[in-house]
Amino acid sequence: MNIRIEDGLPVVEIEIVYKGKEKILRSVLLDTGSSNTIFDVDSVVDIGLVIDTTGGKARRMYGVGGESELCYEQEVANLLIEDYLLNKFIIQLGMTKENYGFDCILGVDFMMKNGVNLDFKNLLIK
């Protein structure tokens, strides 16, 4: 994946596949300061990635400066992000587009699970 810098932040474009449906998310923040991966609920609803009210739970997400908002945390199976298959992976669904301008925030959980290396010299994810 190629990294681009927007307003000083590392941003990528990703293709996700869920339940056989594909979508490109063009504005995805790589956030080493975020412990969890969170998808904008409105950006992924059309591929069936929706809030699971029976298997998930509401969570409060905290940002820099102590601001907080509610999101929904749930486990997903067989979510493909580029070449990375996430099975039994915990994600959050919330309002990242409206509040922060991103379709998704890829957190440290995604990076660690997949052994991702961020190469800022060449602006690549390896």
Image (cartoon, rainbow, N blue to C red):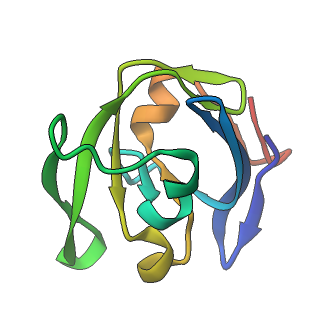
| Relative to 14, residue 9 above or below | below
Quadrant location of the N terminus? top right
Quadrant for residue 18, please give it.
top right
Q: Nearer the viewer, residue 11 or 96?
A: 96
Q: Nearer the viewer, residue 8 or 81?
A: 81
| Relative to 107, residue 114 above or below | above
- Residue 68 position within the rendered picture, expressed as x and y whole percent measured from the top left: 19, 73
In the picture as drawn, the residue positioned furthest to the right comes out as: 122
| Relative to 39, residue 22 above or below | above
- Residue 25 position within the rendered picture, expressed as x and y whole percent measured from the top left: 68, 56
Quadrant location of the C terminus? top right
Tell me what residue is drawn at x 40 percent, y 34 percent. Answer: 109
Tell me what residue is drawn at x 55 percent, y 62 percent. Answer: 43
Q: Nearer the viewer, residue 109 or 21?
A: 21
- Residue 64 position within the rendered picture, expressed as x and y whole percent measured from the top left: 29, 72
Report the number of numbered marks.
Answer: 0
Left or right, residue 57 beside residue 126: left
Tell me what residue is drawn at x 42 percent, y 39 percent. Answer: 108
Tell me what residue is drawn at x 35 percent, y 55 percent. Answer: 93
Left or right, residue 82 beside residue 110: right
- Residue 22 position within the rendered picture, expressed as x and y whole percent measured from the top left: 70, 41
